[in-house]
Amino acid sequence: ATPRHSRMVDAATAGLLAAAAGLTSSGSDAEAALCSPGSSEAGDESNPLDGAHVHGLRVQRRALGRRARRALARAVASACPALASGAADQAMFFGDLPPFARAAAAAVGGEGWEESLRQRSPRFDAAAVNLYRPGDALTPHIDLTPRYRDGVAIVSLGGAVVVQFERVDADSPPATARALLRPGDILTMAGPARYTWTHGFAGGEGAWRGRRVERARVRVGVTLRRLRPDP
């Protein structure tokens, strides 16, 4: 499982996800929460990356528009009933991915990736859906190297978050970088960004170039990976 501080989803969070799927009468309000950034989450429009340069790290700003985010939120809730019911805060899929994961993968641009990553087929065969409430944290980590190949993508829905990167390469000095993710953004990691930098985020609000980024909304992250073959 993805290494993070995990809690069971409460009824309010489950209701929000269900509403985003059009399963309750408050769907329009929930969709707005999953699809639109608040004024305090605006951040810097021009450059979503800050700090040290991280080779292989890229953010596709607004890769999914409002309609696409709404459709993806509905599809996620439909495919992940345990999240919508409040029984879990993570769902994982392997092999022949469900339609929502294929739609998310189709939005991932190949620019900045090695040719082998752009051309491989399938590009992804593993998907994890993680639901984060305000106050949840993601423990700094590197995605499991023995299990997953190079090339990881994270499609972000809901509240904004500042993801922190720390270099852990023994042959290089320590360094820090940050990526601001807003609804519809896609973060991709390949090469050094995938293998020599940890990524995570704190449980409280984040800071972005001197501005406060609130963690007041539920966030859903769809992480796409490619499995390594069995030994």
Image: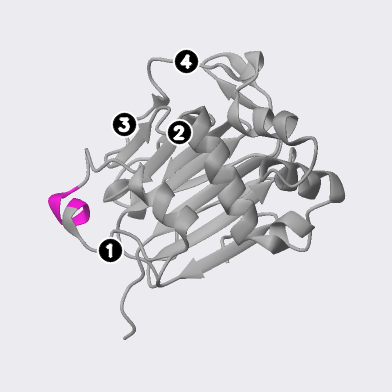
Against 187, residue 198 (above or below) is: below
Which of pointers 4 and 1 indicates the residue nearer the eye?
1
Q: CA distance from mark 3 to mark 1?
A: 29 Å
* The furthest residue to the bottom: 231
Q: Are marks 4 and 2 in contact (CB under 8 Å)?
A: no
The total of numbered circles placed on residues is: 4
Q: Are marks 3 and 1 in contact (CB under 8 Å)?
A: no
Most common SS among magenta residues? helix
Residue 141 visible to the viewer: yes
* The furthest residue to the right: 11
Q: Residue at x 59, y 30 (%)?
A: 35
Q: Which residue is mark 3?
A: 53
Answer with left or right where residue 141 lies relative to residue 148.
Answer: right
Nearer to me, 191 or 64: 64
Q: Are marks 4 and 1 in contact (CB under 8 Å)?
A: no
Residue 205 visible to the viewer: no
Amino acid type, residue under disc 3 in the picture: His
Nearer to me, 34 or 151: 34
Helix, strand, or loop for circle 4?
A: loop
Q: Which residue is mark 4?
A: 44
Residue 122 is tagged as 1
Helix, strand, or loop for circle 2?
A: loop
* N-term mark: 3 or 2: 3
Q: CA distance from mark 3 to mark 4?
A: 17 Å
Q: Residue at x 44, y 33 (%)?
A: 64
Q: Which residues are magenta?
A: 114-118
Q: Which residue is mark 2?
A: 185
- Residue 4's quadrant in the figure? bottom right
* N-term mark: 4 or 1: 4
